[in-house]
Image (tube, rainbow, N blue to C red):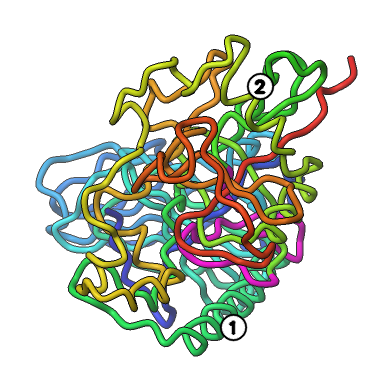
Amino acid sequence: MLVVVLLGAACTPKDQGPSAAPSHVTPAIADAAPVADAGVTLAADAGAPTIGEPGGVVASEGARLTVPEGAVRTPYVYTITRVTGPALADWPRGTHEGFVFEPAGKRFRVPATIELPHPDGDGEVMCQPFAGERLTVPFDATPANQPFRFHVAELPRRCAVYTPEHARALKAARERESAAVTKQLSSFRWEAKGQVCDPHLLVRANAGKDHREPPGEGGCPAGMARIPGRSGLCIDRWEAHLVEILDDGTEHTWSPFFNPGALRVRAKSAPNAYPQGYVSQVQAGRACVASKKRLCRDDEWVAACKGSKGRQFPYGDTEKRGTCNDHRDAHPAAQYLESKDLSVFTKLEHPCISQIPDTLLPAGAKKECATEAGVFDMVGNLHEWTADPSGHFRGGYYVETWLNGHGCDYVTTRHAPVYWDYSIGFRCCADAETP
């Protein structure tokens, strides 16, 4: 894990959505000036420097790495590469310019210092370690003609300097998110039980991971596949997760364990992302529409689950317990809330219920729980809202898939469209794209 120690700033784990290629803007400062310390070699003067126990500095195109004396024992060649323009296509959206460091993951016995240029007096830098979650580093009150400086115990793989517009959008989003969580906390008065989960923390289980939607199949939009026997209709291959739409049009992960409230969100379908629970039918429908999709009708959902052969389960006619995420001996609400009293069923909005072990799985984790068209988790993992106005959700979830029908016929009815709890998610349907 990347360890960052800041000078006059605070750090918070965050993540950004899929990448785009912003145009290059000339950085606000020039390359770091040469220094006269012993053992110092600058990339601008002598190519990539070898830095050993005496320490040293590498500087390139406005960025600078200072390795103090005693930070490393074995000499290494250190490089910094600046990335701009179209080369930022695989970087987080909102990146002003990026810097790649080598050797990524190298740990220091004494923290090293990274200095990065920035286009404004305040903003945000996102550093991605060699392995682990991304880490964002907000900063303020830094003169625009001075680099932003922070310490690291491990050399990151890369750092992205965000545009001022994106930094402001992130700040505004955090304020909205904090208000949404505070409102829920005050409404439900959640309490922590044990050490497994703190309900006051907005956990972003999808942060720092690549969850781009794979190309659609059979002319379907990204992340979708054809519904057998339904000409021109498509369904999400994976249960949906949500991303928040920021003021600058970029995206930010949302917690699958918190209701999104009135935030602007959209649905995405991708493997290995934790799907969104804690969502109402109304919110799910809006998220689908924001992605130019819609909630599935009941008949579409069932047709996709049963496939062309009309199977009872996505994988066949005979139930194979455990093929899907379809069974749990202990009810998670009773387990987390440490009570067998029926009052636990009045607290099904608690964000920790699906964070304890052996509950919610990433989309597609059960590889054999798939239809013939490659649609995953239509039975188990999460209930899934459909478009029925009387409030239907289908498929069962990780506790059971048989109380209200077996497999693809499982349906719970008569829930208000504004109802939500830990067990209910969704996926979207759409028309196939016209050639």
Instruction: Name the disc covering residue 170, or none.
Output: none
Q: Position of residue 192 (x, y in %)?
A: 28, 79
Mark 2 secondary-structure assignment: strand
Is 199 or 35 nearer to us in this picture?
Answer: 199
Q: Which residue is mark 1?
A: 179
Mark 2 or mark 1: whose residue is earlier in sequence: 1
The number of numbered discs placed on residues in the rendered structure image is 2
The secondary structure that dominates the magenta segment is loop
Is 37 or 301 nearer to us in this picture?
Answer: 301
- The answer to whether residue 249 is magenta is yes
Mark 1 secondary-structure assignment: helix
The correct choice, above or below, for 307 with respect to 86 in the image is above
- The quadrant of the picture occupied by the C terminus is top right
Q: Which residue is mark 2?
A: 225
Left or right, 344 with respect to 45, comes to left
The correct choice, above or below, for 92 with respect to 309 in the image is below
Residue at point 19%, 54% (across, down)? 108
Is 208 or 160 nearer to us in this picture?
Answer: 208
Q: State which region is magenta.
A: 240-262
Q: Is residue 231 visible?
A: yes
Q: Is residue 245 visible?
A: no
Q: Dot 2, crowdedness within 10 Å: few (<14), some or many (≥20)?
A: many
**Disc 2, disc 1: CB below 8 Å?**
no
Q: Dot 1, crowdedness within 10 Å: few (<14), some or many (≥20)?
A: few
Instruction: Tell me which amino acid carries mark 1.
Output: Ala
- The answer to whether residue 17 is magenta is no
